[in-house]
Amino acid sequence: MNLKQFFKECNQKEVFKKLSIYIVSSWILIQVLAITWEPLGLPKKSVTILLIILLIGFPINVYLVWKYHLLPLELKEKKFDENGTEITKKKGSFKKMYFYALSVIGFFSIISTILIIENNFSTQVNLSATEESGKIAVLKFGNNTGDEKYDIISKMAADWIIHGITENQVGQVVSPKIVENYAEILKSSLVQTPDFNEKIIKDYFNPGKIIIGNFYLKEDKLLFQSTIKNGKLNTTLISFKLIECDSDNPIECIEKLKQIILGYLITENKQQLNLQQSPPEFEAYQYVLDAKANFSEEDIYLDYLNKAIALDTNYFEPKLLRVGHFYNNGEFEKADSLRNSIPLTSNRNERQRNLLNLYEALLLGNNTKIYNLILKEYNLAPFDIESNSSTMTIALQYVNKPEDIEGIYKEISMKEMDIENCMSCKYRIYIKGLAGIELKKYKEVIKFLEEFASTFDDLNIKRTLATAYVRAGKDNEMQNLLTKIELISSTKDWEDISLFIGKEYLLLSDKIKSNTIFDKLISSYDTKEKDKNYAYALYYKGEFKKAIPVLENLNSKNKSDKETLTKLAIAYYKNSEFTKAQDAINKLNIQFKKYQFGEIDYYLAQYYAAIEDKNNSLEHLLKSVAQGYNYTPNTFQNDVHFLKYKDLEEFKKILKFWQ
């Protein structure tokens, strides 16, 4: 049977008539519901839902036409020969074509249904988080005082908020005046309801948000309340706390309200990164941004943080950043005091509690706990560049897990980053390079760092690249880098990196190359004051007698410099001045105090290693790591003093102490 014959038979058997009844009825139902869904109080998607049901029902109707109309006809049309035997038609004629058509109809019905659902429902999983537009509608505040003299405040509040939104380019504003103009035009043609203005806003402006509020009088105080609703769903996004001011000074309330509304609007899209339980005041938020922009200028950075805290005493982030500032500067008592001034109350959100616990662990030197807590912070905000950088640092330098660094680094792409003006970006590059060196992936580190080292004048990155060159045996490349640094960087940078490279060659037991570096560094001081780099170059070269007077001078100027004091003690011992060596160590021992994080024990371990007292050295080294001393490019496996211990099981356990 061909298609023409099939259609002809369908027409003869009234198939099209039966199907047209379903199609026409469906069309009428859709038209009626499209007009009546709103007066009936049905959901806006009612018409769409009905259309989906009718689409699904159409192939079912086609099947029912077969079962209850065509099949009985087929039974009636059966023919028998003179012997009573049924005369069968050719196999698969009309029935086969009918069910083929049913399959095609069913397929297109399913596809149509999926497309409708995809376009109308899948994007509504979390519409409260997806703005329908960038517009923000601000309605005139309701005057609930019962006194007409306060009507002016209704307009003043809306105007003040609109001015703040416009001035700070937070969004495009739909003002009460615009809404009133539309209402004036439309009120003759639309039924007036209490929420008439809101209906106009939703139907004609489609804003992302609607800001509404009211105020009332309590004795001689004005109380303001405000809410932000989602413009499409009309659901409440946030209700702000009551704001109170004297009735003769309403501008105080209005300004406060503007600040918290702007604070919410500016931070709402950063909820995962937001440390606040409630929006900060906008001006305080701006101070925090200014502080972050001046991170490298310590005094300016701290001043902005203090201004933010003074302006909004409930603002958590600047308080925490201030704790971090003093911790990073080694002012641990001050950091601990400030941390304790932030109460760990039950109403703190998860991220706030986690960060307070993190700083507590940092100040206790519990590195395993520190790493677990920073991983929680990382999981809460993996794309926060500062948290990501901190997680990388703690993974490498607190618990010595270089294998974890790559995965953390890859969470944030650096392609569009302004690396030149991003301290955390440069530090991430530096830490990734260090991790690669610890994993002995020198070629990968070189390839990764060369571009950054040629673009940015960052000593950490260049020093790490130099380390990779030395350990990969690329002496020419290292020398070219050192020469370039000498030509274009500061003298201090060249001196620092020269001393470091000399120590790197000592770690490879290559004294000839290390002495070449040290000799050039030492000779550069012929006409200038001898400083720490000069003294340390003599020390690492083994010229202890020459180093002693310079170290003594440095120690007299800074009695708290434990590294210089330790090197002086070792130099005395190597020069057979044993009494002076012991006196220097005694001075080191009396400097034990809170928040040392294993520093004294580490320097004692260096001293005992230098005088060949392995047991005491390893004992103090274990104590130092247990108290939280960090794994850095200069410590433990990267410290020349412990080179002889690198294959000892005791030393390997120290390297894995926190794992």
Image: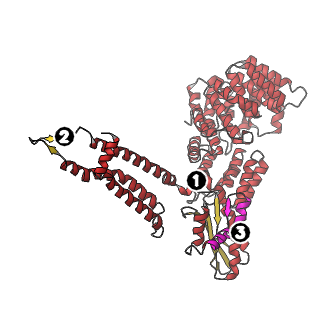
Instruction: Residue 516: say if magenta.
Output: no
Q: Residue farthest to the left?
A: 83
Mark 2 and mark 3 lie on one chain; the one further toward the N terminus is: 2
Of residues 52 and 61, the one nearer the viewer is 61
State the residue at coordinates (56%, 60%): 347
Q: Quick check: 480 left or right of 193?
A: right
Q: Which amino acid does the dot numbered 2 rest on?
A: Thr
Q: Secondary structure at mark 3?
A: helix
Badge 3 local density, few (<14 within 10 Å), some, or many (20+)?
some
Image: magenta residue range: 156-185
| Mark seen at residue 159 | 3
For the point 25% across and 53% down, which residue is it? Answer: 69
**Which residue type does callout 3 highlight?**
Asp
Would you identify the image quadrant in which residue 521 lies?
Answer: top right
Residue identified by numbered label 1: 353
Is residue 144 depicted above or below 46 in this figure?
Answer: below
Quarter of the image with the N terminus in it: top left
The type of residue carrying mark 1 is Arg
Q: Which residue is mark 2?
A: 88
The residue positioned 55% from the left and 43% from the top of the image is 372
User: What is the distance, in whole Å, between disc 1 and disc 3 at their CAs?
Assistant: 38 Å
Which numbered disc, 2 or 1, marks the residue closer to the eye?
2
